[in-house]
Amino acid sequence: MTQEAVLDRAGAAPRRSSGWARFASLILADKKALVGLVILSLFVVAAVLGPVLSPYDPNAMDFDMIVGPSWTHPLGTDDLGRDLLSRLIVGTQISLFVGVSTVAIALVLGVGLGVLAGYLGGWVDHVIMRYIDLQWAFPNFIIAVYLVAVLGTGLVNVIVAISLAFVDDFARIARSMVLSIKEEQYIAAARTVGVSDFRIMWRHILPNATAPIIVQATVSVSYAILGEASLSFLGLGVEAATPTWGLILSESRSFISRAWWLGIFPGLAIMLTVLSINFLGDALRDFLDVREGRGI
Amino acid sequence: MTALLEIKDLVVEFSTPGGTIRAANAVSYDVNPGEIVAVVGESGSGKSVTALSILRLIPDPPGRVCGGEILFQGENLLQYNEEQIRQVRGRRIGMIFQEPMTSLNPVLSIGRQMTEAMRLHLGLTAAQADAKAIDLLKLVGISDPESRLKAYPHHLSGGMRQRVMIAMALSCDPPLIIADEPTTALDVTIQAQILELMKDLCRRLGVALVIITHNLGIVARYADRVNVMYAGRVVERGGAREIYRRPSHPYTIGLLNSVPRLDRPRGSPLDPIPGNPPDLTLLPSGCAFQPRCTHCTAHCAAEAPALLPLGQEHWSACFESEGLYGVAAK
């Protein structure tokens, strides 16, 4: 007893600070995460304050058509004389919203299906996974195009289509994680204290499966933003006048030899957003993994 | 005194690629309130399968309980539906596993895991459950319990984790705790501490304890009664002292002889049981122990001996028991 008491003191439990404080210290220690946070914050500010910040009306046309970056138009103008900076700032809102909301929907649906399939097994697993296999057989983008064709164009339909197309990725990852975790002894131990299947799935297994799901989510945000761009380019996305990054980018293709700024800046915006989300995703994964050597 | 737990003729089968095996073949034993009962046997003897059947945790398929009764406080647990058996798990029967390193969820705090059963079964609020968890951690001898609640399993040593598991098993004041090889994965010095703690707590709180083990030293020191199992059957039963003084089944005698002892000359060879543990798909007719038995007769191959009373509180399943009874182990 006394010996154990001594051991106890040697490995005294770490004093855990609150979650936010810990997250903040983790971000400050991790340069990549800090960069990601700063960039993403700028985009979020742009998304929230878009109309206030933009120097011009994003849809106001002018005779200064296809003019390169200058003091009056910092990022230049497009073929209809619309200010590119204004269009990008206003477009931030839609692009971020599409990226985040599609992934949120796909994550909830996919993880839900995957956990059910992996945990329950048997015919539930068969039914769900055969559907997922079917979806897996087609490229995500083809599925999104098909769904938009069925549902019709428009922002909401684009979000629904892209998120449904991503469901299979999440379902597969969640299922494979659940299959290995459900054999762990701590799951058997949870069952011996009378925890219901539902609680075991969501409260005991899922927290152990977060790391790969978060990685998939951050990657998917970038694909979702690009997916919206691709759909818009094909005329299957949002209405032509709506300033979204993808649409601006695809419209720029016709002028690529004359107006480099029309392609570079929307592309840069997409790239920076995707990069910052990936950096933050890494930090979030480390934060949620309690096992990673913080502590003793 | 009526028994708290009574297992009657339990049969559990598993279908394997090699054929159906009977992991428990008409197992019967009982546990009285507040008593410490040991179930001893080598790997594959059916001791863990029997224990898991009590909480209906046999994976089905491939396993299946095909016969017998498990009476707990007078009710047959085998007839309970899923909802009813969940009310028994943790609330009326606690369970402690072999591997404390893997029995706690690595991503949930100790407090979350400890309070879950109490909130589930006793309907306590978060604050009440935390307070009770702190009391329980004190009870099992863990220092600084308040901060331990926020710790994660990887912050604790093996011995401390097993203490936490004991605290969790005790959390809803169950009348019975089943400990499946609770100390096998621990250092020898910690083993003694954990067993001492479990015995002490059970005595103090009046909780009955079933210890499943292959360690006869544990039996001698901590159990009131012993059930020796071999190939899915109970082959000998009795008071712990009685079994040690007068083992009457050749298997029990063999087990006792194969333990190193301080009162024999140093360097003398151990006396193992010849042969290998039985292959449950290929059990011989008659007594399952007969191929390894030094007392085997023609009778043993023809018929399986039943577990019959031998003396005061002593049963043995061997035709030769009468002759062995009273002859002390070497």
Image (tube, rainbow, N blue to C red):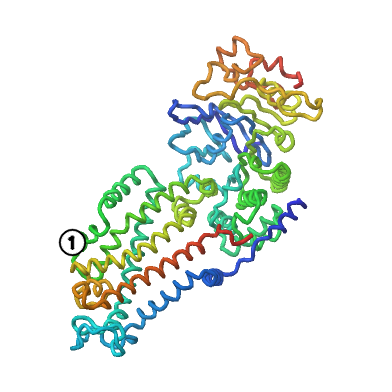
Q: Amino acid at mark 1?
A: Val
Left or right position of B304 against A147: right
Q: Furthest residue to the front?
A: A257
**Could you say which is closer to the camera, residue A134 or residue B228?**
A134
**Could you say which is closer to the camera, residue B181 or residue A139?**
A139
Residue highlighted by disc 1: A150
Q: Is residue A44 above or below residue B75?
A: below
Q: Is residue B328 above or below residue A268?
A: above
Where is residue A155 shown, x and y percent of the image? 25, 71
Left or right position of A68 against B206: left
Q: Is residue B256 above or below residue A237?
A: above
Where is residue A249 shown, x and y percent of the image? 25, 73
Count the numbered circles shown.
Answer: 1
Q: Is residue A67 above or below residue A131?
A: below
Where is residue B149 shown, x and y percent of the image? 62, 60
Where is residue B134 shown, x and y percent of the image? 66, 59
Q: Furthest residue to the bottom?
A: A72
Left or right position of B302 against B318: left
Say few, some or many: other residues with alpha carbon within 10 Å of mark 1 (under 14 / 14 to 19 / 20 or more).
few
Q: Which chain letter matches label 1?
A: A
Q: Quadrant of the C terminus of chain A?
A: bottom right
Left or right position of B83 against B43: left
Q: Secondary structure at mark 1?
A: helix
